[in-house]
Image: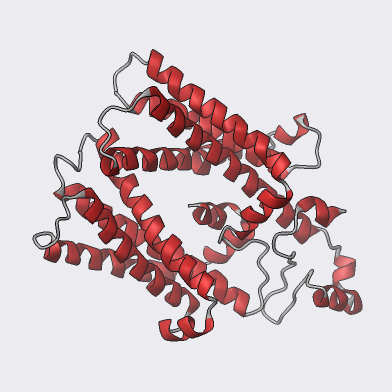
């Protein structure tokens, strides 16, 4: 779900996909797949064994894949046939396989886990209601994200230069070039999340069963993600200065969303995987240790990555003075080298994909 975080946290991407016209088109596009999923469920629930978790997840992944390709084409404002002929096969595979199938399955597990953990509406006991929601919600969400990604690609084709594309390429580049700064945060998250999961299981005496320890683990994961984000956002500051809070209101909002929200998301996806795929009725301490460590470690790593990309975007957008921007000769040289791009509709300042913040400033 890193693409979702990138689309909402990185300012340039967020501004691109939240324009009024884009939101209006997206709302109409999102209506169709959810309705189609509902109709197909009603027609096929007596034909396909959708009360079986694996069948349900496979069907959800299939519908989400179809919805992803369709919504991506709608965002691109081009036909699916033309996109298949012109797009890079690796991107098409990513849209269908990752944004479609894998993301759809994750969202289905998330829906089933929320209903089981917080509403006591277990799919294994009452399959019809959860199964229907586990098809409709993923299809709608996949459609939204695929449409936004298609719109980003459309803007790139029209000349806009995106500092970050939400396909994970920038994260892989960060792992290669800045691993030593990322690793301590991931390690801290793994240790903190795993320890919290184990201690909460050993010491939890309150009501709520699995929900209480899950909340504690996700709170710790959210703090790890927020701290890592601030560290990645201000890599040139002294260590204590990286964590200064300019607006407590904005800090609380960011901690709630995306930090806490996505911590719950990753925790619940793992819970759903264990409960509905592996049918694990009673998890041992090692399983809780692994789930807590993965949740907090992943959130810390993603938080640092998002902070680093925000830093790169900030430095790129603000690193060229207005005087230089008014000099056609200098801007033409920068454009030829790939540092900036200009056009009649947009004049964003771009940076080469995967370029680390430290190299950019050196």
Residue at image point 33% right, 13% down: 205
Image coords of residue 353 (percent x, y): 70, 63
Residue 277 visible to the viewer: yes
Query: Can you tell which quarter of the image residue 6 is in?
Result: bottom right
Looking at the image, which residue sits at the far left? 46
Q: Is residue 166 left or right of residue 65?
A: right
Say above or below: 229 vs 196: below
Residue 249 visible to the viewer: no
Image coords of residue 19 (percent x, y): 53, 66
Residue at image point 78% right, 72% down: 338
Q: Is residue 316 left or right of residue 222?
A: right
Residue at image point 57% right, 32% down: 189
Q: Is residue 109 left or right of residue 251?
A: left
Residue at image point 51% right, 44% down: 258
Say above or below: 256 vs 332: above
Q: 315 and 57: which one is in front?
A: 57
Image coords of residue 186 (percent x, y): 60, 36
Q: How many marks?
A: 0
In this picture the colour scheme is secondary structure
Say above or below: 341 vs 190: below
Q: Is residue 101 left or right of residue 238?
A: left
Query: Can you tell which quarter of the image residue 288 is in?
Result: top left
């Amino acid at each position: 779900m890193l693409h979702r975080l990138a689309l909402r946290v990185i300012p340039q991407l967020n501004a691109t996909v939240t324009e009024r016209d884009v939101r209006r088109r997206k709302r109409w596009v999102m209506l169709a797949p959810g309705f189609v999923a509902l109709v197909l469920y009603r027609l096929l629930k007596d034909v396909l064994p959708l009360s079986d978790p694996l069948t349900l997840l496979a069907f959800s992944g299939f519908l989400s894949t179809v919805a992803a390709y369709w919504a991506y084409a709608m965002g691109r404002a081009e036909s699916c046939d033309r996109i298949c002929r012109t797009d890079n096969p690796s991107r098409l595979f990513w849209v269908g396989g990752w944004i479609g199938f894998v993301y759809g399955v994750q969202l289905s597990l998330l829906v089933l886990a929320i209903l089981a953990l917080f509403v006591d509406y277990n799919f294994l006991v009452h399959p019809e209601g959860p199964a229907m929601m586990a098809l409709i919600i993923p299809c709608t969400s996949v459609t939204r994200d695929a449409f936004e990604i298609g719109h980003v690609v459309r803007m790139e084709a029209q000349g806009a230069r995106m500092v970050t594309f939400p396909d994970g390429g920038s994260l892989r580049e960060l792992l290669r070039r800045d691993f030593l700064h990322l690793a301590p945060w991931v390690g801290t998250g793994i240790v903190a999340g795993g320890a919290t999961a184990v201690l909460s299981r050993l010491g939890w005496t309150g009501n709520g069963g699995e929900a209480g320890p899950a909340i504690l683990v996700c709170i710790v994961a959210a703090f790890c993600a927020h701290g890592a984000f601030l560290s990645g956002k201000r890599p040139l500051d002294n260590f204590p200065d990286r964590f200064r809070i300019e607006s407590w209101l904005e800090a609380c909002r960011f901690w709630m969303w995306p930090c806490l929200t996505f911590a719950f998301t990753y925790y619940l996806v793992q819970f759903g995987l264990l409960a509905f795929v592996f049918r694990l009725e009673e998890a041992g301490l090692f399983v809780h240790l692994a789930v807590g460590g993965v949740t907090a470690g992943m959130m810390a790593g993603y938080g640092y990555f998002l902070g680093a990309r925000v830093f790169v975007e900030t430095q790129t957008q603000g690193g060229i003075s207005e005087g230089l921007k008014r000099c056609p000769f200098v801007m033409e040289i920068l454009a030829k080298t790939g540092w900036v791009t200009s056009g009649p509709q947009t004049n964003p300042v771009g940076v080469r994909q995967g370029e680390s913040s430290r190299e950019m400033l050196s």
